Structure formats: structure tokens, C-alpha cells
């Protein structure tokens, strides 16, 4: 290329990747690294080059916009080391004793115990005691925790007196968040108990209010799972229903440094208090890429309708650039072990007729079709079923409306958020990463 001539960077990238063939996907290479062609502005040219754009002996680079948010590449420092990881992928931001997610083996360990050993053998209260042990002023005993959690449920129910029509008109998880914001901040065990109890009381109460019924008072003698179901339906749940919800709450109690847990730790690192941590975490959880996915899973199953429509429907969704809800994970490269734990938790409900068999059969057919089409369309990215797929079926079978699924997730995950927040406050420093500035520079004087 002649000196003084503008170099077409976008064209060069497209041409180079065409030579690279399949590896670089020639059609979208420039867009994939966030580069878009702009018109050369002489003023900008001056600024970038520090001299007149017409200056002989220089090659002018066509003015391009690099959009870091779109970019799938990471920034490198001059020495070549990585200084920016889009999505913080593979960045280690905390040391934890709480849980480990092994994405290659498809294994979840909570405080040294594998998830498959916790399910069915450990109640939600046991897991809460396990996670909170060492994070409070005094040791936490499961029996003591169950009784104190019951009392805390009774205590937080008084907040229903402040509910108004605006709050009731919010989506359930947002109404729960608004009620949680009424709890005082603190770091101690009493604050933890209130925060653990509050979503379990607020969610069924909000759902009842939304259907024109009054919230029911908590029963401190019941387990958290039994009381949630009783407060939701007004009837004492069956042993199978209690066991299924308990298994769900255990399964989702903690899961490494996911987005909501990270949010909780960031807030904890500022010493703002546990209520603030939980509010940040529940806000992160409600997004459809995180804990907001199971409602859309049911929408997807209903839109597909019948098993023989699955392949075509899923193909069309991928053609439109949509994500298949309940599939894919940042860490798991194999099946999410929580998906199988929840599928197993559904089984006892079949025997009692509490699961819609047709729905379940459709879900299995959709799962198989989705896995096949994802393998075909995304050969370089192992995508498998995640926790949200069977969450949708389980929570529907237990009588929760789909708009409440994220709220139920929050009931179970609050204990993880609290344990991580305390761990961060006890052992961590202020979380304060840096950014790479890619905006315009001030005009030269
Ligand atoms: N459907 C279709 N394609 C997918 C899916 C999916 N569910 N998930 C990832 N991909 C594809 C992306 O399109 C991308 O393909 P490309 O490289 O050809 O553009 C590739 O896989 C990588 O995607 P990323 O966005 O980089 O993956 P990331 O790790 O950021 O995404 C996430 C993880 C957000 C969970 C994603 O898999 C997703 O959106 N899934 C659907 C929503 C969902 O089920 N969320 C619940 C997750 S579990 C939880 O948080 C409790």
C-alpha cells in the first residue's frame, strides 16, 4: 500500500479471515472484534497522528470505531499479558471455602460435600448451618438455626403492614426486593436470620396478595420448605412436595462466584452491610441470563407445543439469534449437575400425580432436540442443559406461578449470598478493579 494512502482496516480483517477460512468465520470477523468502519475526520486524523493527515511519509489508517462491549477479544498490555477479560471469564476474584464448581467434571462441592451426597440427606436448614458456620459470632447448629429461622419468619411478616398497591403491582421478585429493602443493614447473626427468613415469607405473601388473598402467618414449627408451601397454598403440603422443595433449596444454595454472588461480595467489600449485599445480589439474579431463565423455559415449552415441532422451533429461534433458555453455562462444559439433581427431585412427585406428565415428556423431547441442534450449530462451544431447565418443571409442579420462579431461586440462594458476603468482609479487601479507557482524549492544547 502506498504511503499517504488510507488503509482499509475493516477490509483487511475481512480479507485475512477469509484466507483463515472456517477458523475465523469470514463474514463477521470485523464485527466480532467490535470494529466498525467510520468516515475519516481530518480533525481526528490530526489528533491521532499528532500532525497534519496529509503529511507525506505516513500511512493513514482508516478511522474505525472499536466497540469494547461488542468485542469478543480481550485487551493486551504492551508486554502482551492480558489486562482485560470481557465478562471476567477465568478471572479469579476471591478465595472461598464455601463451594467449588468444576466445569469440566460437572461437579459441585459445597463445604467439602459433593452435591449428590447432600441431596436427600441434608435439609435446607442443615446446608444453611454448613454454609454459615464460621461466618457468625458463634458456631451455628442446624437445630438451633431451624428454630431461630422459624422465629425470624414470624418477625419479618410484620412488614406486610407496609404493602401498598404499587408494590403489589410489581413482578414478584421486585416486590420481594422492595420489601427486603425495609430491613435494617447489619453484619450479625440476627440480620442473617431475618434476611434468610424474609424472602421465604415475602414471596408467598406477595403472590397471595396479587391473587386477592391475605398473606398467611408463618408457622415457626415447620421447616422453611414446608412453611413456604403452606403459606403459598393455604394447605399443609405433602411429604413429597416438602422433600422436592427442600431438595431444590439445597441444590441452589451456593454455586461459586456466579454473577449475583459476586455482586454480594462487591457490596460486602465496602462494608455496607448484609441487607445491601442481598439487595444487590437479588437484582443481579433477576436477569434472564442468570436466575431469570426458568420462567422463559416454560414459555419456550409452550411455544414449541409438541415434541415433533421441537427441532424446527429451536432452529428458527437460533436463526433469529436467540438463546435457548435453560442451556449453556459460563463454567460448565458438560451437563450442570444441578439439572440431574432437580430431575431426580421431580420423580417422587410423579407417583403422587403432582407432575404434568405431558409437560415432562415434552421437556425431555425438547432437551434432546436442543442438545442435538446446539451441537450442530455451535460445534466449538460445548452447550448442555443447565439448572434452570428442570427448575421450571419442578417449581411449576409445586404450584408456583412462572413469574415467581426467580423469587424462589432467591429464597434458596440468599444463604450463599450471606455466607460469601461474610467471607468477603472477614477475609477480603475492597473490590476495586480498573478499566481500560477507550473513549476520546481531550483535544490537544
Ligand atoms: N443458546 C444458544 N446459544 C448459546 C447459548 C444458548 N443457551 N448459550 C451460549 N450460546 C452460544 C453463544 O451464542 C455464543 O456463540 P457464538 O460464539 O457463536 O456467538 C457461545 O455460545 C458463547 O456464548 P457466551 O455468551 O460467551 O457464553 P457465556 O458464558 O457468556 O453465557 C449464559 C452463559 C449467559 C448462561 C448463556 O449460556 C445463556 O445465555 N444461556 C441461556 C440463559 C440461561 O439459561 N441462563 C441461566 C444460566 S444458569 C444460572 O445462571 C443460574
Image (cartoon, rainbow, N blue to C red):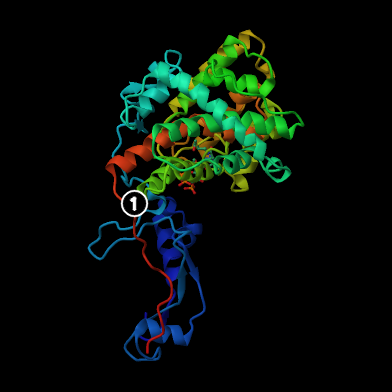
Disc 1 on helix, strand or loop?
loop
Q: Is residue 221 visible?
A: yes
Q: Nearer the viewer, residue 434 or 301?
A: 434
Quarter of the rendering occupied by the N terminus: bottom left
Quarter of the rendering occupied by the C terminus: bottom left
- Looking at the picture, how far across and down is residue 106, in whole percent? 39, 28
Q: Residue at x 68, y 18 (%)?
A: 356
Give the residue at mark 1.
431
Q: Residue at x 49, y 32 (%)?
A: 194
> Splitting the image into 4 quarters, where does residue 203 fall?
top right
Q: Is residue 371 visible?
A: no
- Neighbourhood count class around disc 1 (C-alpha, 10 Å): few under 14, some 14–19, many 20 upward: some
Q: Nearer the viewer, residue 282 or 422?
A: 422
- Looking at the picture, how far across and down is residue 168, in whole percent? 70, 40
Quick check: 341 above or below 407? above
> Splitting the image into 4 quarters, where does residue 440 fall?
bottom left
Amino acid at each position: 500500500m502506498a504511503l499517504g494512502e488510507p488503509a482499509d482496516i475493516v477490509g483487511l480483517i475481512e480479507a485475512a479471515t477469509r484466507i483463515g477460512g472456517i477458523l475465523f468465520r469470514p463474514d463477521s470477523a470485523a464485527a466480532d472484534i467490535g470494529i466498525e468502519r467510520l468516515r475519516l475526520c481530518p480533525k481526528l486524523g490530526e489528533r491521532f497522528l499528532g500532525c497534519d493527515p496529509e503529511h507525506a511519509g505516513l500511512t493513514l489508517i482508516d478511522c474505525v470505531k472499536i466497540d469494547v462491549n461488542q468485542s469478543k477479544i480481550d485487551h493486551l498490555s504492551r508486554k502482551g499479558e492480558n489486562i482485560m477479560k470481557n465478562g471476567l471469564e477465568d478471572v479469579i476474584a476471591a478465595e472461598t471455602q464455601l463451594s467449588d464448581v468444576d466445569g469440566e467434571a460437572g461437579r459441585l462441592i459445597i463445604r467439602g460435600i459433593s452435591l449428590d451426597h447432600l441431596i436427600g440427606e441434608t435439609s435446607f436448614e442443615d446446608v444453611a448451618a454448613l454454609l454459615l458456620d464460621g461466618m457468625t459470632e458463634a458456631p451455628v447448629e442446624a437445630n438451633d438455626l431451624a428454630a431461630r429461622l422459624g422465629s425470624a419468619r414470624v418477625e419479618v411478616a410484620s412488614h406486610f403492614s407496609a404493602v401498598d398497591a404499587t408494590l403489589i403491582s410489581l413482578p414478584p421478585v421486585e416486590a420481594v426486593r422492595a420489601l427486603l429493602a425495609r430491613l435494617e443493614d447489619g453484619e450479625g447473626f440476627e440480620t442473617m436470620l431475618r434476611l434468610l427468613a424474609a424472602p421465604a415469607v415475602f414471596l408467598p405473601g406477595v403472590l397471595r396478595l396479587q391473587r386477592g388473598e391475605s398473606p398467611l402467618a408463618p408457622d415457626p414449627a415447620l421447616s422453611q420448605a414446608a412453611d413456604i408451601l403452606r403459606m403459598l397454598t393455604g394447605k399443609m403440603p405433602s411429604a413429597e412436595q416438602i422433600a422436592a422443595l427442600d431438595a431444590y433449596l439445597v441444590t441452589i444454595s451456593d454455586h461459586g462466584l456466579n454473577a449475583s454472588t459476586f455482586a454480594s461480595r462487591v457490596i460486602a467489600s465496602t462494608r455496607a452491610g448484609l441487607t445491601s449485599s442481598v439487595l444487590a445480589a437479588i437484582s443481579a439474579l433477576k436477569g434472564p441470563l442468570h436466575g431469570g431463565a426458568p420462567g422463559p423455559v416454560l414459555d419456550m415449552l409452550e411455544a414449541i407445543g409438541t415434541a415433533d415441532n421441537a427441532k424446527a422451533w429451536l432452529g428458527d429461534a437460533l436463526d433469529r439469534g436467540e438463546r435457548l433458555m435453560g442451556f449453556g453455562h459460563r463454567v460448565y462444559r458438560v451437563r450442570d449437575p444441578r439439572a440431574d439433581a432437580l430431575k431426580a427431585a421431580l420423580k417422587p412427585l410423579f407417583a403422587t400425580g403432582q407432575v404434568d406428565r405431558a409437560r415432562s415428556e415434552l421437556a425431555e423431547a425438547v432437551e434432546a432436540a436442543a442438545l442435538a441442534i446446539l451441537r450442530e450449530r455451535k460445534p466449538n462451544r460445548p452447550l448442555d442443559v443447565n439448572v434452570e431447565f428442570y427448575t421450571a418443571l419442578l417449581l411449576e409442579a409445586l404450584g408456583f406461578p412462572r413469574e415467581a420462579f426467580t423469587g424462589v431461586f432467591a429464597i434458596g440462594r440468599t444463604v450463599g449470598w450471606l455466607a460469601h458476603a461474610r467471607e468477603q468482609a472477614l477475609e477480603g479487601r475492597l473490590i476495586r478493579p480498573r478499566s481500560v479507557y477507550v473513549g476520546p482524549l481531550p483535544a490537544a492544547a
